[in-house]
Image: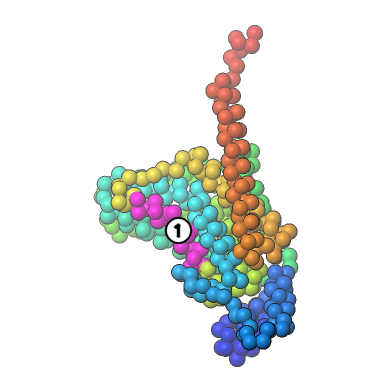
Amino acid sequence: LADYERELGFTAQGVPVTIVGDRVWVGFSDAIGEQIEEALTDSEAPVPSGSSPPGPTTVDVPLVGSVTLESSSLLLSTLVIGFVDGVNPCSLWVLSVLLAIVLHSESRRRVAAVGFTFLTVTAAMYALYIVGFYSALNYAGQLGPIRVLVAAVALLFGALQLLDGLGNRQTPSLSISAGAKPNLYRRMRRLSSPQASLPALLAGTVVLAVGVSLLETPCTAGLPLLWTAMLTEQGVSPAVAAGLFAAYMFVFLLDELLLFGAAVLTMRATRLQEKHGRALKLLAGSVLVTLATAMLLAPQLMTSVLGAAVIFAIAGCLAVGLWGLSRWLARRRAPAAQAGPVPPSASR
């Protein structure tokens, strides 16, 4: 096995290890079994005279490197899931409020220092979460019930996000609780003090970022859990997993980097409104529910670009439909809220 590892450039981090030609699978699942059967069928097919066996077509992708078209469905899924995960309302709300408060110092240097430190620490914490998910699922990936458990958890998270996005106050919310917000505001205001030295400012930002990362874990845990389960399910090599992880983190941070850059350049902050937060929750919930359903009922769909595109298109349509429903519900609630309780004299 060590000879094959050196020759093919992989590390066997689990069992079983299956090698067909120059392709390697570590672990086993239904999707991996189908890929192995296809590889065996292709290897037994007769090659027309005068032609050579078709090799895997590859394309060069920034941050990822050479990617075979067979694994491009994972790249598509990584980019879409990473982007949707990045626009979650919890992290955007915290960053927008933090920048708005620090901007009162009227120091571009302080805004840049606080924003950069905050994003670096929260990104590092989030990267540790994802690596932990991947390591745990990769270790237990050969257990059949794991996929069902992951899909069930993702369905629960997705349903809670959808209910929250529709304005339901009767179910638990995955957002940062109202009780935790006053303490966050106090910590943020300390960072706007012009008397604070730069080292103290950065230390306070690190403490705030760690606390925020812990508070917003329920708001963001569903999508990376599903994504790492997809990597484990398809048995990607550590090198491919690392490349996809880099792509995930890039698109995950893209919107926050744009928000931060705009604040530093213009010295103005963009605040996330409640209606925007609800729309983002509906988008994240739709993606979670659709992907979890596909993982349970038709996991083979995620092994092709077309299948992945269809799943994300369904998620997008679901999000748009639910957004329309939420607007209709908001219009129905508005007259009742404006009317208020009926005074005793009016009921006589």
Residue appearing at x 60%, y 73% in the figure: 236
Image coordinates of residue 58 in percent, x first then y, are: 54, 75
Q: Is residue 257 magenta?
A: yes
Q: Is residue 8 above or below residue 69?
A: below
Number of callouts: 1
Q: What amino acid is at disc 1?
A: Leu
Q: Which residues are magenta?
A: 245-262
User: Where on the picture, by quarter, is residue 150?
Assistant: bottom right
Image coordinates of residue 287 in percent, x first then y, are: 60, 53
Q: Is residue 66 magenta?
A: no
Image coordinates of residue 72 in percent, x first then y, are: 57, 68
Q: Is residue 52 above or below residue 74?
A: below
For the view shown, which residue lies furthest in the bottom direction? 3
Residue appearing at x 60%, y 33% in the figure: 329
Q: Is residue 47 above or below residue 333?
A: below
> What type of secondary structure mainly makes up the magenta span?
helix
Residue appearing at x 30%, y 51% in the figure: 265
Tell me if residue 201 can be seen: no
Residue density around tag 1, few if under 14, some if 14–19, many if 20 or more, within 10 Å? some
Q: Nearer the viewer, residue 171 or 26?
A: 26
Q: Nearer the viewer, residue 248 or 121?
A: 248
Tell me if residue 259 can be seen: yes
Q: Which residue is mark 1?
A: 253
Report the side of 202 relative to 302 (left or right): left
Report the side of 178 relative to 190 (left or right): right
Tell me the quadrant of the picture where the N terminus can be found: bottom right
